[in-house]
Structures are given as structure tokens and as C-alpha cells.
Image (spheres, grey):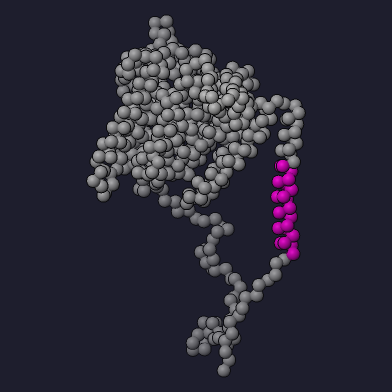
Amino acid sequence: MAVPIAARSVRRPARPLARLSGAVRRGRLTALAWALVLGYVTVFVLAMVHTSYDTWGALLVAPALMAVGTPVLARVAAGNPERGVFKLLMVAMAAKLACAFPRYLMAFVLYGGAADAKMYHQKGSELARYLTTADLSAGLHYDLGMKVAGTGFVIIVTGVVYAVTGPTLVGGFLVFSWLGFWGLLFFWRALQIAFPEADSRRYAKLVFFLPSLLFWPSSIGKDAWMMFCLGLTTYGVARLLDRRFGAFACIALGSLGTAMVRPHVTVLAGAGLSVAYLLRRRPRQVSALGPLRTVLTAAVLAVGVMLMLQQVSTFFGTNGTGGDAVNQVLSETSRRTSQGDSVINAATAEDPAPAFSLNPVKLPVSVVSVLFRPFPFEASNLQNLIQSVECFALLVMFVRAWPQLARIPKLFVQRSYVAFAVVYTLLFCWAFSTINNMGILSRERVQVLPLVLVLLAIPRPAAARPVRSRRPPLWRVQPGQWGAARQGPEPPVAVGAPDPSRTQGGSTS
């Protein structure tokens, strides 16, 4: 009696051509790596010979920043379930650092150095020289020549940076741009924590690669610092709403950083946080100390907002914190920004500084003005024209996202992080609508765009998602899907097995 023996698959030896192509591929990568290293060293030597440390110092700072940021991004990506996150974050960090160079060219080539970054660089270099030569054990005795809050604080940050890197102008742009990137990363992580069902991948592409967020917070100055601190504050808000450890530390550090530069923005974030905290969802099982903890947290937030209001009054030199003080500050802002080539709503002799109105009817106009202007027909130069293209594209995205935006009232209670984003956005647009210069408004707008983009990450309702049933392409057709099945190689037949082409009765089918 014959015993069936299963046919064994024979493993073919690797072809010499495949091994050769793999070796060539690896050789090309090695050659490319050595070419990049050689090119970098050549540029570095030429820059040291023909330029000052203001320029060639950036060639030391950029690799150091990438080396510090890469392992942190690898750890963030390791805890993310989506694929390709590490590559996305690395490209985002490289793009953010690269935008420091056109931002530098705009400030010192296009504008001839007529930028705040020049003053920060000069003052910061002097402070760095003092920090590296003075005897710090005897205490710090350095006169900034101005108050610490506001411009003075950014000078201190610049001096501390230069004490580590050396006074390099282009390198300083890279460091501040790098800080702005981490602020954007905090915004992205906050969305994932407090709004997990949102389209985080779309949000990442918008928040990391929106031209305004790439370009403006890439200079030595307040914009990059505010982006970093606002991102840290928002990250703390997300952890607080999700009841995670370390929330108050992040909120306190981020709020302190913003309050030292622009305390009025800190008040707007505090108001949004207060509303979001009151609307947050309660856990099903509440401990005995739960109500007491809620009351204490609300009291701490209220005290913090009051202290910030007092800081705003001191910062702007107003009397009190009521409506008259707000009107005085915003009217002065309108007067100061009503000059230059990019002015809108130019002041008249009868109304040199229009007063701030608390009428909520004007709120929609303020939102459109702050978020979507300048319009293309309002552009007065090439910079405004480029900015108007981005604003128009953003407006189109919001119009197309109307089904998602209709869910905002429901998400106010379900996801109070959306309430935080909406309240902060509305208050920001209300306050900053008094800016009458499009160039200034384009820079200031980056402080609200990361939270505005949260609304574009709201997922569509299940009923509104289109179901597409289209025919697959020819190269993806399965055998037998269209017509007869494709005849492939027959499987090996065991010795002594019955012929599958015959039936049990012995006749052919």
C-alpha cells in the first residue's frame, strides 16, 4: 500500500543579482552620507574663514538642536499608535528650523535690520557677556535699563540662550524657532489627550506646516516665546481636563511665561480654562473629596485670573481693571497700529482712536477680521498677498467643514477642550480686532491659530460620512472577481492521492 508523501517546498538560493543590487544600494547610501558630511565640513570651514560667528555659529547650533530633539521625538512617537509619526515629527522639526533662515533674511535683508530682533540680539549679547564673566556667587547686579515684564524679559531669555551658545545672531533665530516648534508639539499632544476622537493626523499636518505658524514664530522675539508658553499652558489644560498628573505645574509655568511677556493673552487663556473646567464631564464614581477638590480648583483659577488682570493693569499703566481700563488699552492699541502701508480702518481726525465696543453683535465681524484678513484685494505688498492666500485657503476649509462645526454646541459638554478653544478664540478675536495694521495682525494671529485649527479636526458625524463604492483598479483585481479565475500553478499532489479531476464514481466532471 502506497503511503502519501507531502511535497516539500524547495527554497531557492539567493540570486547573485539580488545580492549585488542590495550591495549597490547600501553603497549609494553610504556614499551619500559621506558626501553630506564632507559638504557640511567644507561649508563650515568656508563660513569660519569668510563670516563672523554671528553666521557660522548657526552651523554648530542647528545639529545640536536636532541631536537634542530627536530622542525626545522618538519617545513621543513610540507612545503613539499611528504609523509614521516619528517621520512626521522629524520633518516638522526640520521645517521649523529651516524657516529661521527666511525669517532672518526678511528682518535683516528685506527690512535692513529694522526689526526687534536686532535690539534683542544686541542687549542679549551684553547680558550673556556679563553672565559668562561676572562672579555669580556674589549675586546678580545687572541693569536692563527697562522693566523686566515685556521686552526686558525677552532680553533676559536671549541673554541666557547666548550664554550657552555664544552670541550668534542666526543661531539665536534657530533656537527661538526650535522653542516655537515645541510649543506646536504641546498643542498637538493636548489635542490627543483631551480630544482623542479628533482627527489628530490632520491637525498635525495643519499645526506643523501652516505657513504662518512655520514662519512668524521663527525669530528672536516674543512670538516664538509666546508660542512655546501657550503650548505648555494648553498642554496643562488638557491634562487637567483629563485628570492627569502634572497639570497644574504645566499651567503655572506656561502662564508665568506668557504673563511676563503678554499678560493680557494669559487672561484670555485663563478665561477659556475657567469655562472649560466648569463644563468638564464628571466621573461616574466621585470620591468624598471630589466636590471639595472642584471648589478649590475653581477658587484657584478665579484667584489666578484676578492676579492676571491686576498684572495687565500694571503692564499697560491703567487705573483699575474695569471696562474703562479695557477701553483705554484697546483704543491706544488701535491708535498705535493705525500707521504704515498695511493699515486698515484708517483713523480720521474726528475719530483718531475708535473706542472698544462691548456690543456682541460686532463679534462675528471681529472673528472674520482677525482670522481671515487680509483679503486678496486688500493686499498692499507681496507679503500681504502671500498672507491673503493662506487666509483665503483657511476660510475655504472652514466653509467645507460646516458639518463638523455644527457639532460644536454638543461638544461643549462632551469635550470641554473644545469649549476652551472656542472661548479663547472668541475673546482673542474680540480683543485683537482693534489692530489696524495687517502686518502686525499677521504676527499676532499665530497666538490663536493652533486652537482655531482644533475646530478643523472635529470628526464628521457618522451619518454624514460618504460611503464610496468605486471599482478597484485593474492591478488590484482579485482572481475570479471579473470573469474566470486566473490559472495559477497547481499545488503539489501527494503520491497515491486521488485524482481531483475525477468524481467519486470514477467519471470526469
From the image, which quarter does the N terminus lie in?
bottom right
Q: Residue furthest front?
A: 138
Please tell me whether residue 491 is drawn above or below residue 334 in the rendered image: below
Q: Is residue 111 visible?
A: no
Q: Which quarter of the picture shows residue 120?
A: top right
Please tell me whether residue 26 is drawn above or below residue 115 in the rendered image: below
Position in image of residue 203 (x %, y %): 46, 40
Towards the viewer: 20 or 133? 133
Q: Which quarter of the picture shows residue 159?
A: top right
Residue ID at (70%, 50%): 29
In this rendering, position of residue 143 left or right of residue 314: right
Residue ID at (37%, 18%): 313
Region of the chain picked out in magenta, as a range:
16-37
Towards the viewer: 143 or 376? 143
Please tell me whether residue 174 is drawn above or below residue 24 in the rendered image: above
Report the number of numbered marks: 0
Residue 507 is one of the magenta-drawn residues: no
From the image, give the main secondary structure of the stretch colored magenta. helix
Position in image of residue 187 (x %, y %): 45, 37
Towards the viewer: 490 or 292? 292
Residue 20 is one of the magenta-drawn residues: yes
Position in image of residue 315 (x %, y %): 41, 18
Residue ID at (46%, 26%): 445
Q: Residue furthest top?
A: 349
Residue ID at (40%, 41%): 246
In this rendering, position of residue 508 left or right of residue 56: left
Q: Is residue 417 visible?
A: yes
Q: Which quarter of the picture shows residue 167?
A: top right
In this rendering, position of residue 288 left or right of residue 171: left
Towards the viewer: 362 or 46? 46
In this rendering, position of residue 60 left or right of residue 217: right
